[in-house]
Image (tube, coloured by chain):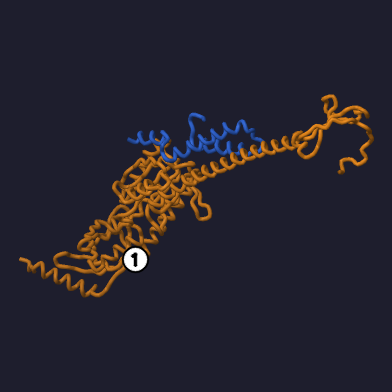
Chain colours: A orange, B blue
Amino acid sequence: MPQAIKLSELAYEIQETMEARFEGETFWVTAEISDVKKYTSTRRCYLKLVEREGNNTNTELRAVFWANYYTEIEQFERKTKQVFADGIEITCEVKVRFHPKYGLNLDVVKIDVAYTLGTIELERQKTLEKLVAENPKHIKLVEGNYITYNNKLPLPIVIQRIALITAPNSDGQRDFKQELEKNKHGYAFSVTEFLTQIQGDTAHQLIGEQLQLIYNSKENFDMVAIVRGGGSQTDFKPFEDYILAKTVATFPIPIYTGIGHDRNTSIVDMMAREHKTPTKVASKIIEHNFEFENSIIELKERLSQQVDLLIDNAKENIQSMKRLVKLASPANMMKKGFAIITQNNQIIIDPKNIQPNTEIDILLQDEIIYTNVTKKEKNAQGTNL
Amino acid sequence: MPKELTYNKAFTELEKLVEQIEDDTIQLDTLAAKVKEANELIAYCEEKLQGIEKEVKKAKEKKK
């Protein structure tokens, strides 16, 4: 009969050996994470670190973030705008630990955020390059900016019929609609909601499906707003997706994005018109309509000024005509001392018809002088009286 | 006014009218008609912006 020892004795033996080798030492490893289970209340996270060769897993070790190190995960999510979730690759510092009951575990004490940021940036550059390379007609890189079919679409002169893609009962949905409704100019809007999950693994597909629905009745909309706000702001990934970015870049209705990242700009933002937050998207729309109303008001003012001017001018013309007529009237002339000379009730304009020793009548303003012509000669003085 | 009016049409038409009215050769007897038309276009745009116009309502009904 073989000599058996207790299991715990063996375990103790293993533990001692492991401690002798690994005590006090840490290692930096790069691996994919899977089976991530986060317990936010107790601030622990259990996961597996995995290494694959093609489709086969060749290494898989259990790992854990204890409460003291849970901030590493929070920091990671904040800085990378990515959820700490299955499938991503991280570089982290671990301690090797063996427990008789729980077996082999890696205690994670630090995550190298820069590594993940680096891979995200690399991935992002690849996606952007692919977008430009495979859609040369619709996406161009000009002096660091992405000029796309969509973000160069002219905006309708007034935006009123809006297709809104957002998460149901979200802050983004509420903020956007509130901002539109409370607009001080009293503009009316018709907002049709296309509600969907806007974060998580399948969000890019779900958003794409909503865009397809909008496309099917595209003549009913002036623009599309994709908004997100509040809640977890960490998940940037859906908006970095190649297919969604391409759909946005080639979409035939102008798209405004307000997905709530003040410092970062996602690829989808670059393909559309980016306005950062749901509230800003709404206020841009109001501003756009206000510009139109302003130009109408301007035309209205020009119109009324011109009409006033035309009428004033006409009035003035009539007035000066009246004055002219009045000044030239015989009554007015006589008031100034001019006289009318008549002979046989005919007004004499040409004195050559008047003969000496004939009677003429001199009509003054108040009296008529009947007189006889005694003498006639050329006027040498002219009118220079 | 044309039957199928849009913001674009209304705006272009309005601009044209104002320019015509600003032209010194305008005849006073056509002024009234042009001013009336311009005012109708302005009212159309303002009412539509505020949503009194039917079209916006129609779009809302479609949604339901």
What percent of the width, then of the height, locates residue A206? Answer: 33, 44
Rendered-image quadrant of the N terminus of chain A? bottom left
Label 1 sits on residue? A112
Total count of labels? 1
Give whichever of A39, B58 is nearer the camera: B58
What percent of the width, then of the height, locates residue A78? Answer: 33, 61
What percent of the width, then of the height, locates residue A239? Answer: 38, 51
A54 relative to A292 in the view: left or right? left
Q: Is residue A32 above or below residue A159?
A: below
Give whichever of A112, A56 is nearer the camera: A112
What crowding class fits label 1: few (fewer than 14 Cα within 10 Å), some (14-19), or many (20 or more)? some
- Note whether residue A293 is visible: yes
Q: Is residue A91 above or below residue A16?
A: above
A318 relative to B46 in the view: left or right? right
Name the residue rendered at 26%, 67% in the picture: A69
Q: Amino acid at mark 1?
A: Asp
Say which quarter of the image contains residue A336. top right
Give whichever of A168, A318 is nearer the camera: A318
What percent of the width, then of the height, locates residue A309? Answer: 61, 41
> As drawn, which residue projects farthest toward the top?
A344
- Note whether residue A138 is visible: no
> As drawn, which residue projects farthest toward the left?
A1
Give whichever of A88, A42 is nearer the camera: A42
Name the residue rendered at 21%, 60% in the picture: A39
Mark 1 falls on what kind of element?
Answer: loop
Q: Is residue B26 above or below residue A133?
A: above
User: What chain is tagged by disc 1?
Assistant: A
Rendered-image quadrant of the C terminus of chain A? top right
